[in-house]
Amino acid sequence: MKKRILATVCMAVAGLLAFSACSFSDLIEKPYDADDTFPYDVAEERGTAGSPESWLASQETPSTELRRLYEEARADGSFAGTYYEFLQGMDLSEDNGAYVQNALRSSVTVYALFHNGTHGDFYALGSGIVYSLNTQEGDALVVTNYHVVYNASSNGKETIDHISDSITLFLYGSLPDNEDAAASSAAIPATFLGGAMEYDIAVLKVDDSPILTETEQNNVYAKEVVACNSDSVTAGERVYAIGNANGQGVISVTEGVVSVESEQVQFRSADEKSYITLPEIRIDAAVNHGNSGGGLFNGSGELLGIVNGRMEADGVVGFGYAIPANVALAVAQNVIDTCAVSAAAHGGAQARLGITVQRTDSRGIFDERTGKYYTEEKIVVSEVQSGYAGARAGMQAGDTLISAKITSRGGEVYITKMLKLTVLLLEVRSGDAVEFTLSRENQAYTVTVIFGAEDFRLID
Protein backbone atom coordinates (compact mmCIF):
# COMPACT_ATOMS: atom_id res chain seq x y z
CA MET A 1 0.00 0.00 0.00
CA LYS A 2 1.47 3.33 -1.02
CA LYS A 3 2.14 5.70 1.84
CA ARG A 4 1.72 9.43 1.36
CA ILE A 5 3.66 12.06 3.27
CA LEU A 6 1.29 14.79 4.42
CA ALA A 7 1.33 18.16 6.12
CA THR A 8 -0.13 18.64 9.55
CA VAL A 9 -2.70 21.33 10.10
CA CYS A 10 -1.57 23.33 13.11
CA MET A 11 -0.88 27.02 12.67
CA ALA A 12 2.87 27.71 13.02
CA VAL A 13 3.68 23.99 13.01
CA ALA A 14 4.71 21.95 9.98
CA GLY A 15 5.31 18.33 10.81
CA LEU A 16 3.65 15.29 12.43
CA LEU A 17 3.50 11.76 13.62
CA ALA A 18 3.87 7.85 13.87
CA PHE A 19 2.46 4.32 14.04
CA SER A 20 3.16 1.97 16.94
CA ALA A 21 2.12 -1.15 18.85
CA CYS A 22 4.33 -3.47 16.97
CA SER A 23 6.13 -2.88 13.71
CA PHE A 24 4.36 -3.59 10.46
CA SER A 25 4.81 -3.72 6.70
CA ASP A 26 2.51 -3.94 3.71
CA LEU A 27 2.29 -6.76 1.21
CA ILE A 28 6.00 -7.52 0.93
CA GLU A 29 7.60 -10.76 -0.20
CA LYS A 30 7.26 -13.21 2.68
CA PRO A 31 10.35 -15.02 4.04
CA TYR A 32 8.12 -17.66 5.65
CA ASP A 33 5.16 -19.88 4.84
CA ALA A 34 1.88 -18.40 6.05
CA ASP A 35 -1.34 -20.37 5.99
CA ASP A 36 -4.52 -19.42 4.13
CA THR A 37 -6.63 -18.62 7.19
CA PHE A 38 -8.59 -15.42 7.75
CA PRO A 39 -10.23 -14.64 11.13
CA TYR A 40 -13.62 -15.52 9.63
CA ASP A 41 -12.43 -19.04 8.83
CA VAL A 42 -11.70 -19.76 12.49
CA ALA A 43 -15.02 -18.23 13.59
CA GLU A 44 -16.74 -20.52 11.09
CA GLU A 45 -14.94 -23.58 12.47
CA ARG A 46 -16.11 -22.60 15.94
CA GLY A 47 -19.68 -22.45 14.69
CA THR A 48 -20.02 -18.79 15.65
CA ALA A 49 -20.30 -17.37 12.13
CA GLY A 50 -22.86 -17.39 9.36
CA SER A 51 -21.84 -16.02 5.99
CA PRO A 52 -18.64 -13.96 5.79
CA GLU A 53 -20.64 -10.78 5.27
CA SER A 54 -23.07 -11.37 8.15
CA TRP A 55 -20.19 -12.29 10.46
CA LEU A 56 -18.23 -9.14 9.60
CA ALA A 57 -21.40 -7.09 10.15
CA SER A 58 -21.79 -8.68 13.58
CA GLN A 59 -18.28 -7.53 14.56
CA GLU A 60 -19.14 -3.86 14.35
CA THR A 61 -21.12 -1.41 16.43
CA PRO A 62 -23.00 0.75 13.91
CA SER A 63 -21.52 4.25 13.85
CA THR A 64 -24.69 6.07 12.72
CA GLU A 65 -28.03 6.53 14.43
CA LEU A 66 -29.94 5.29 11.38
CA ARG A 67 -27.98 2.04 11.34
CA ARG A 68 -28.64 1.60 15.04
CA LEU A 69 -32.38 2.17 14.52
CA TYR A 70 -32.34 -0.38 11.72
CA GLU A 71 -30.57 -3.01 13.83
CA GLU A 72 -33.05 -2.39 16.68
CA ALA A 73 -35.97 -2.83 14.28
CA ARG A 74 -34.48 -6.08 12.99
CA ALA A 75 -33.91 -7.31 16.54
CA ASP A 76 -37.46 -6.62 17.75
CA GLY A 77 -39.03 -8.04 14.58
CA SER A 78 -40.66 -4.80 13.45
CA PHE A 79 -38.67 -4.78 10.20
CA ALA A 80 -37.23 -7.67 8.21
CA GLY A 81 -35.85 -6.08 5.06
CA THR A 82 -32.45 -4.71 4.07
CA TYR A 83 -30.98 -1.45 5.30
CA TYR A 84 -31.54 0.06 1.86
CA GLU A 85 -35.25 -0.82 2.08
CA PHE A 86 -35.35 0.60 5.61
CA LEU A 87 -33.92 3.92 4.38
CA GLN A 88 -36.57 4.14 1.65
CA GLY A 89 -39.19 4.36 4.38
CA MET A 90 -37.36 7.05 6.35
CA ASP A 91 -37.41 10.82 6.07
CA LEU A 92 -33.78 11.55 5.25
CA SER A 93 -34.26 15.30 5.03
CA GLU A 94 -33.63 15.80 8.74
CA ASP A 95 -31.31 18.61 9.72
CA ASN A 96 -28.16 17.45 11.51
CA GLY A 97 -27.63 20.95 12.88
CA ALA A 98 -28.79 20.04 16.39
CA TYR A 99 -26.30 17.17 16.55
CA VAL A 100 -23.53 19.46 15.33
CA GLN A 101 -24.47 22.07 17.93
CA ASN A 102 -24.11 19.39 20.59
CA ALA A 103 -20.66 18.50 19.25
CA LEU A 104 -19.66 22.16 19.50
CA ARG A 105 -20.08 21.88 23.26
CA SER A 106 -17.21 19.38 23.34
CA SER A 107 -14.91 21.48 21.13
CA VAL A 108 -12.23 23.95 22.20
CA THR A 109 -9.67 26.25 20.65
CA VAL A 110 -6.06 25.73 21.80
CA TYR A 111 -3.43 28.47 22.05
CA ALA A 112 0.10 27.25 22.86
CA LEU A 113 2.71 29.95 23.52
CA PHE A 114 6.35 29.35 22.54
CA HIS A 115 9.55 31.39 22.77
CA ASN A 116 12.27 31.76 20.16
CA GLY A 117 15.40 33.76 20.86
CA THR A 118 15.58 35.11 17.32
CA HIS A 119 11.94 35.70 16.46
CA GLY A 120 10.44 36.30 19.90
CA ASP A 121 7.19 34.85 21.21
CA PHE A 122 4.65 33.12 18.98
CA TYR A 123 1.50 31.04 19.32
CA ALA A 124 0.78 27.67 17.79
CA LEU A 125 -2.97 27.55 17.25
CA GLY A 126 -5.01 24.39 17.16
CA SER A 127 -8.12 22.68 18.45
CA GLY A 128 -9.17 20.01 20.94
CA ILE A 129 -12.04 17.99 22.35
CA VAL A 130 -13.25 17.73 25.96
CA TYR A 131 -12.51 14.15 27.03
CA SER A 132 -13.65 14.42 30.64
CA LEU A 133 -15.29 17.19 32.67
CA ASN A 134 -16.05 17.75 36.35
CA THR A 135 -18.23 20.86 36.64
CA GLN A 136 -18.30 20.68 40.44
CA GLU A 137 -14.54 21.14 40.64
CA GLY A 138 -13.94 22.96 37.35
CA ASP A 139 -11.56 20.21 36.18
CA ALA A 140 -11.24 18.81 32.68
CA LEU A 141 -9.05 16.70 30.41
CA VAL A 142 -8.74 17.77 26.79
CA VAL A 143 -7.35 15.72 23.91
CA THR A 144 -5.50 17.43 21.08
CA ASN A 145 -2.64 16.73 18.66
CA TYR A 146 0.88 16.49 20.05
CA HIS A 147 2.15 18.84 17.36
CA VAL A 148 -0.19 21.56 18.62
CA VAL A 149 1.63 21.84 21.96
CA TYR A 150 5.13 20.80 20.80
CA ASN A 151 7.24 23.09 18.63
CA ALA A 152 10.66 22.15 17.31
CA SER A 153 11.63 25.80 16.66
CA SER A 154 11.11 26.98 20.24
CA ASN A 155 14.16 27.74 22.36
CA GLY A 156 13.85 24.33 24.02
CA LYS A 157 14.07 25.78 27.52
CA GLU A 158 10.56 24.83 28.56
CA THR A 159 9.88 22.67 31.62
CA ILE A 160 9.58 19.80 29.12
CA ASP A 161 11.72 20.61 26.10
CA HIS A 162 9.66 22.14 23.28
CA ILE A 163 6.33 21.58 25.07
CA SER A 164 4.50 24.86 25.69
CA ASP A 165 4.47 26.09 29.30
CA SER A 166 1.56 28.42 28.54
CA ILE A 167 -1.48 26.68 27.07
CA THR A 168 -4.84 28.40 26.91
CA LEU A 169 -8.22 26.99 25.91
CA PHE A 170 -11.38 28.72 24.72
CA LEU A 171 -14.87 27.26 24.52
CA TYR A 172 -17.17 27.74 21.55
CA GLY A 173 -18.23 31.37 21.24
CA SER A 174 -15.31 32.68 23.32
CA LEU A 175 -12.51 34.70 21.77
CA PRO A 176 -9.28 36.22 23.10
CA ASP A 177 -9.72 39.83 24.20
CA ASN A 178 -6.39 40.84 22.72
CA GLU A 179 -3.12 39.46 21.41
CA ASP A 180 -2.31 38.04 24.85
CA ALA A 181 -4.61 35.01 24.86
CA ALA A 182 -3.75 33.99 28.41
CA ALA A 183 -4.89 37.37 29.75
CA SER A 184 -8.34 37.15 28.18
CA SER A 185 -11.36 36.96 30.45
CA ALA A 186 -12.59 33.85 28.62
CA ALA A 187 -9.24 32.05 28.85
CA ILE A 188 -9.05 28.62 30.48
CA PRO A 189 -5.45 27.85 31.54
CA ALA A 190 -4.31 24.30 30.87
CA THR A 191 -1.15 22.28 31.40
CA PHE A 192 0.39 19.43 29.47
CA LEU A 193 -0.41 16.18 31.28
CA GLY A 194 1.29 13.90 28.77
CA GLY A 195 1.24 12.61 25.24
CA ALA A 196 2.77 10.41 22.56
CA MET A 197 4.58 12.05 19.66
CA GLU A 198 4.46 8.86 17.62
CA TYR A 199 0.66 8.87 17.75
CA ASP A 200 0.37 12.68 17.61
CA ILE A 201 -1.90 12.70 20.65
CA ALA A 202 -1.57 14.92 23.73
CA VAL A 203 -3.70 15.26 26.86
CA LEU A 204 -4.13 18.66 28.52
CA LYS A 205 -5.25 19.14 32.12
CA VAL A 206 -7.46 21.91 33.51
CA ASP A 207 -7.71 22.43 37.28
CA ASP A 208 -10.14 24.63 39.21
CA SER A 209 -11.34 26.72 36.29
CA PRO A 210 -14.11 29.16 37.29
CA ILE A 211 -15.38 29.01 33.71
CA LEU A 212 -15.91 25.25 33.99
CA THR A 213 -17.40 25.36 37.50
CA GLU A 214 -21.20 25.19 37.59
CA THR A 215 -22.78 27.74 39.96
CA GLU A 216 -26.02 29.70 40.15
CA GLN A 217 -24.25 32.54 38.41
CA ASN A 218 -22.34 30.41 35.89
CA ASN A 219 -23.93 27.92 33.52
CA VAL A 220 -21.41 25.48 32.05
CA TYR A 221 -22.52 24.49 28.57
CA ALA A 222 -19.40 22.47 27.77
CA LYS A 223 -19.78 18.68 27.88
CA GLU A 224 -17.69 15.56 27.57
CA VAL A 225 -17.41 14.22 24.04
CA VAL A 226 -19.35 11.09 23.09
CA ALA A 227 -17.39 8.76 20.83
CA CYS A 228 -18.68 6.10 18.45
CA ASN A 229 -16.94 2.92 17.29
CA SER A 230 -14.65 4.30 14.60
CA ASP A 231 -13.96 0.78 13.29
CA SER A 232 -17.51 0.87 11.91
CA VAL A 233 -17.10 4.02 9.83
CA THR A 234 -18.51 3.72 6.31
CA ALA A 235 -17.23 5.23 3.07
CA GLY A 236 -19.72 7.91 2.00
CA GLU A 237 -20.84 8.56 5.59
CA ARG A 238 -21.54 12.23 6.30
CA VAL A 239 -19.01 13.84 8.66
CA TYR A 240 -18.27 17.21 10.23
CA ALA A 241 -14.81 18.60 11.03
CA ILE A 242 -14.96 21.05 13.94
CA GLY A 243 -12.04 23.23 14.95
CA ASN A 244 -10.15 26.50 14.92
CA ALA A 245 -9.87 26.70 11.14
CA ASN A 246 -7.12 29.04 9.89
CA GLY A 247 -6.19 29.81 13.50
CA GLN A 248 -8.63 32.69 13.78
CA GLY A 249 -9.93 31.62 17.19
CA VAL A 250 -13.41 30.99 15.82
CA ILE A 251 -14.54 27.36 16.06
CA SER A 252 -16.03 26.49 12.70
CA VAL A 253 -17.73 23.51 11.06
CA THR A 254 -17.08 22.00 7.66
CA GLU A 255 -19.11 19.17 6.15
CA GLY A 256 -18.07 16.29 3.94
CA VAL A 257 -18.03 12.53 3.62
CA VAL A 258 -15.67 9.71 4.50
CA SER A 259 -13.57 9.08 1.41
CA VAL A 260 -11.51 6.14 2.68
CA GLU A 261 -12.39 4.25 5.84
CA SER A 262 -8.84 3.30 6.81
CA GLU A 263 -5.39 3.73 5.31
CA GLN A 264 -1.81 4.08 6.50
CA VAL A 265 -0.48 7.61 6.01
CA GLN A 266 3.00 8.96 6.66
CA PHE A 267 3.68 12.34 8.31
CA ARG A 268 6.70 14.19 9.56
CA SER A 269 7.04 13.94 13.34
CA ALA A 270 6.53 17.00 15.54
CA ASP A 271 10.27 17.20 16.26
CA GLU A 272 10.91 17.26 12.48
CA LYS A 273 13.53 14.54 12.84
CA SER A 274 11.75 11.55 11.35
CA TYR A 275 8.64 10.29 9.59
CA ILE A 276 5.91 8.38 11.30
CA THR A 277 2.89 6.43 10.07
CA LEU A 278 -0.67 6.29 11.41
CA PRO A 279 -3.96 4.64 10.58
CA GLU A 280 -6.15 7.42 9.20
CA ILE A 281 -9.70 8.12 8.05
CA ARG A 282 -9.63 10.14 4.82
CA ILE A 283 -12.32 12.81 4.41
CA ASP A 284 -13.24 15.46 1.86
CA ALA A 285 -14.48 17.99 4.45
CA ALA A 286 -12.37 21.14 4.28
CA VAL A 287 -9.45 20.96 6.74
CA ASN A 288 -7.25 24.00 7.28
CA HIS A 289 -4.32 25.02 9.45
CA GLY A 290 -5.68 25.37 12.98
CA ASN A 291 -8.01 22.35 12.65
CA SER A 292 -5.33 20.11 14.20
CA GLY A 293 -6.58 18.34 17.32
CA GLY A 294 -10.23 19.09 16.62
CA GLY A 295 -12.93 16.49 16.34
CA LEU A 296 -14.29 14.69 13.31
CA PHE A 297 -17.93 13.97 14.13
CA ASN A 298 -20.59 11.82 12.50
CA GLY A 299 -24.14 12.92 11.68
CA SER A 300 -25.22 12.11 15.25
CA GLY A 301 -22.60 14.40 16.77
CA GLU A 302 -20.42 11.50 17.97
CA LEU A 303 -16.63 11.57 17.71
CA LEU A 304 -15.21 9.58 14.80
CA GLY A 305 -11.66 10.84 14.94
CA ILE A 306 -9.13 13.58 15.73
CA VAL A 307 -8.28 15.75 12.71
CA ASN A 308 -4.53 15.90 12.21
CA GLY A 309 -3.50 16.54 8.61
CA ARG A 310 -4.25 17.20 4.99
CA MET A 311 -2.68 16.60 1.59
CA GLU A 312 -0.95 19.73 0.28
CA ALA A 313 0.54 18.35 -2.94
CA ASP A 314 -0.08 20.38 -6.08
CA GLY A 315 -3.25 19.38 -7.86
CA VAL A 316 -4.68 17.47 -4.88
CA VAL A 317 -7.97 18.82 -3.49
CA GLY A 318 -10.08 17.67 -0.56
CA PHE A 319 -7.74 15.19 1.15
CA GLY A 320 -8.15 15.67 4.91
CA TYR A 321 -7.21 13.10 7.54
CA ALA A 322 -8.27 12.13 11.05
CA ILE A 323 -6.85 9.62 13.52
CA PRO A 324 -9.65 7.11 14.25
CA ALA A 325 -11.30 7.75 17.62
CA ASN A 326 -10.66 4.16 18.77
CA VAL A 327 -6.91 4.72 18.37
CA ALA A 328 -6.75 8.35 19.55
CA LEU A 329 -8.77 7.78 22.71
CA ALA A 330 -6.94 4.54 23.54
CA VAL A 331 -3.69 6.52 23.42
CA ALA A 332 -5.21 9.30 25.53
CA GLN A 333 -6.50 6.91 28.20
CA ASN A 334 -3.18 5.07 28.25
CA VAL A 335 -1.39 8.38 28.87
CA ILE A 336 -3.87 9.34 31.61
CA ASP A 337 -3.49 5.99 33.38
CA THR A 338 0.30 6.02 33.12
CA CYS A 339 0.58 9.57 34.46
CA ALA A 340 -1.74 8.66 37.34
CA VAL A 341 0.65 5.90 38.41
CA SER A 342 3.84 7.93 38.00
CA ALA A 343 3.99 11.65 38.73
CA ALA A 344 7.18 11.85 36.66
CA ALA A 345 5.60 10.33 33.57
CA HIS A 346 4.66 12.49 30.59
CA GLY A 347 3.61 9.75 28.21
CA GLY A 348 2.08 6.31 28.00
CA ALA A 349 3.25 2.73 28.41
CA GLN A 350 2.28 0.41 25.57
CA ALA A 351 2.36 -3.36 25.78
CA ARG A 352 4.72 -5.01 23.32
CA LEU A 353 4.77 -8.54 22.03
CA GLY A 354 8.20 -8.33 20.42
CA ILE A 355 6.85 -9.40 17.04
CA THR A 356 6.76 -7.83 13.61
CA VAL A 357 3.48 -8.27 11.77
CA GLN A 358 2.39 -7.55 8.23
CA ARG A 359 -0.78 -7.42 6.25
CA THR A 360 -0.39 -10.26 3.74
CA ASP A 361 -3.87 -10.26 2.26
CA SER A 362 -7.07 -8.24 2.31
CA ARG A 363 -10.52 -8.82 0.89
CA GLY A 364 -13.65 -6.75 0.44
CA ILE A 365 -17.00 -8.41 1.20
CA PHE A 366 -20.36 -6.80 0.45
CA ASP A 367 -23.32 -7.40 2.76
CA GLU A 368 -26.67 -7.11 0.97
CA ARG A 369 -28.52 -6.73 4.26
CA THR A 370 -26.58 -3.72 5.56
CA GLY A 371 -25.70 -2.41 2.10
CA LYS A 372 -22.10 -2.06 3.19
CA TYR A 373 -18.67 -3.22 2.07
CA TYR A 374 -16.54 -4.76 4.79
CA THR A 375 -12.80 -5.25 4.65
CA GLU A 376 -11.11 -8.22 6.29
CA GLU A 377 -7.33 -8.26 6.52
CA LYS A 378 -5.01 -11.15 7.26
CA ILE A 379 -2.37 -10.08 9.79
CA VAL A 380 0.61 -12.44 9.91
CA VAL A 381 3.67 -12.63 12.18
CA SER A 382 6.80 -12.15 10.10
CA GLU A 383 9.41 -12.00 12.87
CA VAL A 384 9.60 -12.95 16.55
CA GLN A 385 12.24 -11.45 18.85
CA SER A 386 13.60 -13.76 21.51
CA GLY A 387 12.99 -12.87 25.13
CA TYR A 388 9.79 -10.92 24.53
CA ALA A 389 6.21 -11.83 25.37
CA GLY A 390 5.39 -13.25 21.93
CA ALA A 391 8.39 -15.58 21.97
CA ARG A 392 7.62 -16.68 25.54
CA ALA A 393 4.11 -17.59 24.43
CA GLY A 394 5.43 -19.66 21.52
CA MET A 395 4.47 -17.39 18.62
CA GLN A 396 6.29 -18.16 15.37
CA ALA A 397 6.87 -16.43 12.04
CA GLY A 398 4.04 -17.40 9.72
CA ASP A 399 1.36 -17.46 12.43
CA THR A 400 -1.84 -15.63 11.48
CA LEU A 401 -3.34 -13.51 14.26
CA ILE A 402 -7.02 -14.42 14.61
CA SER A 403 -8.34 -12.88 17.84
CA ALA A 404 -7.38 -11.64 21.28
CA LYS A 405 -9.06 -11.22 24.64
CA ILE A 406 -7.93 -9.50 27.83
CA THR A 407 -9.16 -12.24 30.16
CA SER A 408 -10.01 -10.01 33.13
CA ARG A 409 -12.38 -7.92 31.01
CA GLY A 410 -13.80 -10.49 28.59
CA GLY A 411 -14.92 -9.65 25.08
CA GLU A 412 -13.00 -11.37 22.30
CA VAL A 413 -11.74 -9.06 19.55
CA TYR A 414 -11.18 -10.57 16.11
CA ILE A 415 -8.12 -9.02 14.49
CA THR A 416 -9.74 -8.25 11.15
CA LYS A 417 -7.65 -5.09 10.73
CA MET A 418 -4.17 -4.03 11.79
CA LEU A 419 -5.43 -1.19 13.95
CA LYS A 420 -7.41 -3.61 16.16
CA LEU A 421 -4.11 -5.03 17.36
CA THR A 422 -2.80 -1.50 17.91
CA VAL A 423 -5.78 -0.56 20.09
CA LEU A 424 -5.62 -3.83 22.03
CA LEU A 425 -1.98 -3.32 22.99
CA LEU A 426 -2.75 0.24 24.06
CA GLU A 427 -5.50 -1.07 26.35
CA VAL A 428 -3.36 -3.73 28.05
CA ARG A 429 -2.05 -2.86 31.52
CA SER A 430 0.69 -4.48 33.60
CA GLY A 431 -0.49 -7.77 35.07
CA ASP A 432 -3.09 -8.40 32.37
CA ALA A 433 -3.35 -11.85 30.79
CA VAL A 434 -4.22 -11.78 27.10
CA GLU A 435 -5.46 -14.86 25.30
CA PHE A 436 -4.45 -14.90 21.63
CA THR A 437 -5.90 -17.24 19.04
CA LEU A 438 -3.56 -17.87 16.10
CA SER A 439 -3.55 -20.09 13.05
CA ARG A 440 -0.53 -22.17 12.08
CA GLU A 441 -0.60 -24.44 9.05
CA ASN A 442 -4.38 -23.86 8.91
CA GLN A 443 -4.89 -25.10 12.47
CA ALA A 444 -6.14 -22.74 15.17
CA TYR A 445 -4.51 -22.75 18.59
CA THR A 446 -4.54 -20.50 21.63
CA VAL A 447 -1.72 -19.03 23.73
CA THR A 448 -1.89 -16.82 26.81
CA VAL A 449 0.49 -13.92 27.35
CA ILE A 450 0.87 -12.43 30.83
CA PHE A 451 2.27 -8.92 30.54
CA GLY A 452 4.71 -7.89 33.24
CA ALA A 453 6.31 -4.49 33.74
CA GLU A 454 9.19 -5.49 31.43
CA ASP A 455 6.76 -5.99 28.53
CA PHE A 456 5.93 -2.31 28.12
CA ARG A 457 7.65 0.47 26.27
CA LEU A 458 7.29 4.18 26.88
CA ILE A 459 5.43 6.26 24.32
CA ASP A 460 5.98 9.97 24.84
Image (cartoon, rainbow, N blue to C red):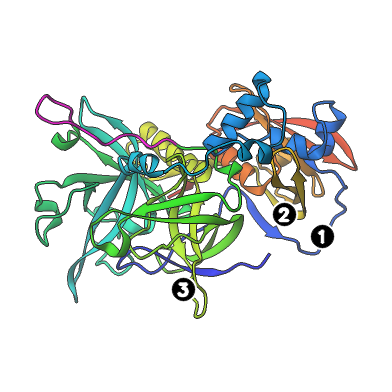
Q: Where is residue 92 in the image (x, y as percent from the top left)?
A: 52, 42
At a point 32% along the width and 44% down the height, the residue shown is: 104
Q: Which of marks 3 and 2 is nearer the N terminus?
A: 3
Disc 3 on helix, strand or loop? loop
Q: Which of marks 2 and 1 is nearer the N terminus?
A: 1
Q: Is residue 2 above or below residue 105?
A: below
Numbered circle sitting on residue 179: none
Q: Residues within 10 Å of mark 1 (few under 14, many from 20)?
A: few
Question: Residues at badges 2 and 1 in contact (C-beta under 8 Å)?
Answer: yes
Q: Position of residue 155 (x, y in %)?
A: 24, 67
Q: Position of residue 325 (x, y in %)?
A: 49, 44
**Residue type at mark 3?**
Glu
Q: Is residue 225 above or below residue 20?
A: above
Q: Is the magenta stretch mostly helix, strand or loop?
A: loop
At a point 80% along the width and 30% down the height, the residue shown is: 49
The span from disc 1 to disc 3 (Cα, nearest Å) is 34 Å
Q: Residues within 10 Å of mark 3 (few under 14, many from 20)?
A: some
Residue labelled with disc 1 = 30
The span from disc 3 to disc 2 (Cα, nearest Å) is 29 Å
Residue 164 lies left or right of residue 279; in this view the side is left
In magenta, the rendered stretch is 213-226
Residue 79 lies left or right of residue 44; in this view the side is left
